[in-house]
Amino acid sequence: MRYVYNSGDTAWVLTSAALVLFMTPGLALFYGGMVRRRNVLGMLIQNFAVMAVVGLLWVWVTYSLAFGPDWGGAGIIGTLHFAGLGHLSQAVPGYTGAHAQTIPPVAFIVFQMMFAIITAALLTGASADRMKFGAFIAFVVAWSVLVYAPIAHWVFSPQGWLAQRGTEDFAGGTVVELNAGLAGLALALVVGRRRGWPENLMRPHNVPLTVMGGGILWFGWFGFNAGSALSAGGAGVAFVNTNTATAAALLAWIAVEKLRTGKPTTLGAISGAIAGAVAITPACGFVNTAGATVIGAVAGVASALAVSVKFRVRIDDSLDVLAIHGVAGLVGTLMVGLFGTAGSLGSNGLFYGGGASLLGHQALAVVCVGAFSFVMTALIALAIRAVIGLRVSEEEERLGLDLALHEENAYDFEAAGGRRAIGEGGFA
Amino acid sequence: MKLITAVIKPFKLEDVKTALQAVGVTGMTVSEVQGFGRQGGHTEVYRGAEYRIDFVPKVRVEVVVADTDADRVVDVFVESGRTGRIGDGKVWVTPVEDLVRIRTGERGNEAVT
C-alpha cells in the first residue's frame, strides 16, 4: 500500500527528533554539574556512550522489538521483523484509522530512537560516580533490550497490552519517566552507595552547568512532547501545556524551599522545571490549561519533598532519578485519569465526567511498568555484578572516574594561582 | 627583612592592595586559598539537604618588607582589611633570612623594592 505523507507533519517530527536527541547532552550537563569535580567527565562520557550504543541498538534490534509486529498477539513484545530496519516501506503496525501515521516510518523510527536514548541516559543519575565503564555499557545494552523495548511495546505501540486496555501516555510518563525512576532505584540499590555517602554529602561542583543543561532539557522537551503528536497540526496543545506545567512546577518547587529553608535555590528552580516537564509528559496532549497548571504544581511540590527521602532510607539515588522522574512521572500519569478531557486528544478523566475507568487504566500501567522495570533492572544489574562486577575499586572511586577510568581532567585551574580542590566533598 | 602574610576576605583585596601601594609597597603575591578560623564554615542547601562547608574562600597576600617598615605595613593590613565582622582573617610576620632579586642578583634590603 502506498501512503501519501504529510510534509508538514514529517518535517515537524524530524525536527522534534533532533530536539529530543539534544536533550541527552542537556541531561549530561544537568547531571555533570551535580557530581563532584573529579567525576564530571565520567558522567558526560556515559551519556554520550548511551547515544551511540542505543542509537545502534535501536536500528538493529530494539526498534523492532518495541514497534514491530506483535509476537503471538499478547501485546508483550514485537518480533524482529524490522530488525536492521528491514521492510521500511511497511507502515508501523497498529497505527490505523484515526491514528494512522501521516509520516514515513523512518521518521517515526528516528523520533522514537531518541526516547530510547534519553531513557537509558537518565540512569546515569542513579549510579553516578561509581560504575565501571564497561559494566555500564553492558548494562545499557541489556536494559534497552529487556526493559525499555518491552515497556515501549506495552504502552507506546497500539498493539501493546496496556495501550489496548486504554492506558494513555502521550509522550512517555510511564515508558520514559516512571520506568527510569524505578530502574534508577533498582540500579542504585544493586550498585550500592558512593563510598562515604551519606555521612559526607557530595555537593554539586558546578551549578551553572546544571542550570544550562536543564535549560536545554526544557527546550528539547517541546520536541519530546509536542513531537509525540506525530503531526504538526496536533502539536500546539502539547507544546503549550509543556511550558505551562514546567513553569508551574518551577514556582512550586522554590515555594516549598522558601517555606522549608527560607530561600529559593537555583538548583531547586531548575529541578522544579524538570519535574514539571516530566509530569506533563504523559498528559500534554490530553489535558487543558487548568490540568497542565495543576499537574505541574503538584509535581513540583511532590518532587521537592521526595528528594529528602533517600537520606532517611539511605539509598544513594545520587541525582534523584526516582524523586524527580519517578515521582513526577507517577503524578502526571495518574492525573491524566483526573484531568484528561476528550476536548483534547484523549478520553475524559474523573473530573470531566469520564468516571474512574481512565484513572484505573493509568494506575494499572503505573503498577505494571513500575514493578517490571524495578525487578528486571535489579536482575540485570545483579547478573552483571556477578559476571564482571559493577563498581570501580575504592582507589579509583577516591581518585574520581575522570582520571581513573578516562585519564582526563575536566578543568585546569593550575595556572590560576595554584588553586587546588581543598575540601572538595567526599572522603578524600 | 620580614615576610608579612595576611589571609583576608576576598572582597577586601582591592582595598588592601590600594592601601599598601599608598604606603610604598611595590610588590605582593596573591593567592586564592580556602580555610577556616573562628568564623567556621557556612551552610549550603542543595535540593533540600544542608551541606556543612568547613572551608571558606579567602585570599592570601604576601609581601616582603624591610624590618623598619614591618609594623607600619601590618597596621595598613589591619586597617584596610577590617570589616569588623567575624572572618576578617589574620596577619602574621616572619623573619626572612635572605632575599635575592633574580634578574640582578641584588641581595637583602636592596632586593626589597
Image (cartoon, rainbow, N blue to C red):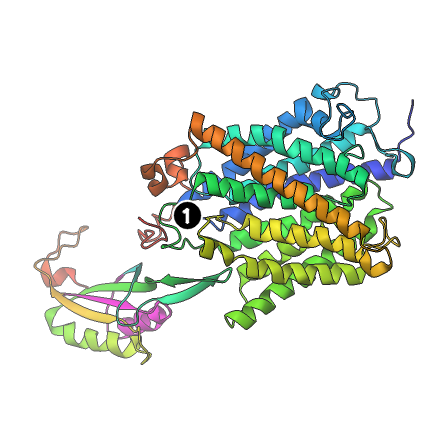
Q: Nearer the viewer, residue B5 or A232?
A: A232
Is residue A44 found inside the magenta-colored segment of the image? Answer: no
Badge 1 element: helix
Give residue A193's position: percent from left, percent from top. 42, 45
Q: Is residue A280 above or below residue A129?
A: below
Instruction: Left or right? Give the position of B33 relative to B91.
Output: right
Q: Residue at x 33, y 39 (%)?
A: A394
Q: Which residue is mark 1?
A: A37
Give residue A33's position: percent from left, percent from top. 49, 50
Is residue A280 visible in the rendered image? The answer is: no
| Screen quadrant of the N terminus of chain B | bottom left
Image quadrant in which you'd find residue B17 = bottom left
Give residue B41's position: percent from left, percent from top. 33, 66
Instruction: Name the chain letter of the residue that bears numbered label 1.
Output: A
Q: Residue furthest bottom?
A: B84
Is residue A237 visible in the rendered image? The answer is: yes
- The residues colored magenta run B1-29
Q: Nearer the viewer, residue B77 or A187?
A: A187
Image quadrant in which you'd find residue A93 = top right
